[in-house]
Amino acid sequence: DTGVSQDPRHKITKRGQNVTFRCDPISEHNRLYWYRQTLGQGPEFLTYFQNEAQLEKSRLLSDRFSAERPKGSFSTLEIQRTEQGDSAMYLCASSLAQSGTQYFGPGTRLTVL
Amino acid sequence: AQSVTQLGSHVSVSEGALVLLRCNYSSSVPPYLFWYVQYPNQGLQLLLKYTSAATLVKGINGFEAEFKKSETSFHLTKPSAHMSDAAEYFCAVSVSSGGSNYKLTFGKGTLLTVNP
């Protein structure tokens, strides 16, 4: 069990650029979640997948955000036309559908200049 | 919708003292409750979880929490604080939807500092 991994760990970009993050869940986990954490706050739910199906998206996920999990394994989160307000830690978690216990990756810290 | 309130954004204790971090939840259905710990610039590590079995839950690193339905609370305790316990702690709630739990709703976190 290698745990949940995320890449990159840090990303600095200029406003208006597009960025993409990757998450590799624990191998046998069929559920994958994305959360966003801003400074001084708890993580907030963005979206989740069961296998390759995206089953729910938060209102926080604007049209500039898109997430995919094409083969039911790794997932990508893309932010288009980044804004300074997108600066945050983006966390990925995975679980077994019947368990409900989510295991988190180390996160990707995004800084938009 | 469910919610979590963590009382006290910052708790400071002396090494060896009791740690008590407070969490109250709101949920219209029986919840699952979790405590996670986060060290600087890292992800969240699961400390313990309540999933409707025993109300006193033991976790890693000597932490435990007690589910009290009448008080809608799930406070985290540790009898004796270590310097390595200094971190941010998050309480979270999850409820069943369509027969299986999914998204977590987190509190704002409590930063624990441990003084030598």
Image (cartoon, rainbow, N blue to C red):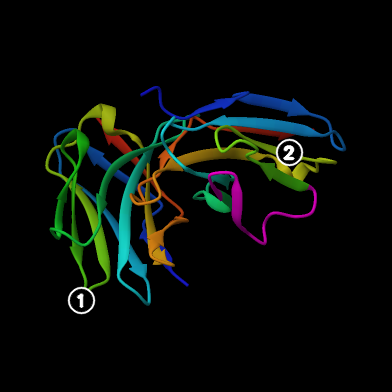
Q: Residue B38, image x and y in percent?
A: 40, 36
Circle 2 sits on which residue? A78
In the image, is B110 to the left or to the right of A64? left
Q: Three-letter amino acid code at disc 2?
A: Glu
Circle 1 sits on which residue? B70
Residue B59 occupies quadrant? top left
Of A16 and A4, nearer the camera is A4
In the image, is B29 to the left or to the right of B49? right
Q: Residue A100, image x and y in percent?
A: 36, 51
Of B45 and A22, nearer the camera is A22
What quarter of the picture does the C terminus of chain B occupy?
top left
Which residues, given as a range, are shown in magenta?
A49-64
Residue found 16% across the figure and 51% down from its top: B57
Of A89 and A101, nearer the camera is A101
Q: Is residue A63 magenta?
A: yes
Q: Mark number for residue A86? A: none
Residue found 76% across the figure and 32% down from its top: A19
Q: Residue B36, image x and y in percent?
A: 35, 44
Q: Chain of mark 1?
A: B
In the image, is B78 to the left or to the right of B42? left
Q: Is residue B66 magenta?
A: no
Q: Residues within 10 Å of mark 1 (few under 14, many from 20)?
A: few
Q: Chain of mark 2?
A: A
Vertical placement of residue B41 versus B27, above or below: above
Figure disc tally: 2
Residue A109 occupies quadrant? top right
Q: Residue B26, image x and y in percent?
A: 37, 72
Q: Secondary structure at mark 1?
A: loop
Q: Three-letter amino acid code at disc 1?
A: Ser
**The furthest residue to the front:** A71
Q: Residues within 10 Å of mark 2 (few under 14, many from 20)?
A: some
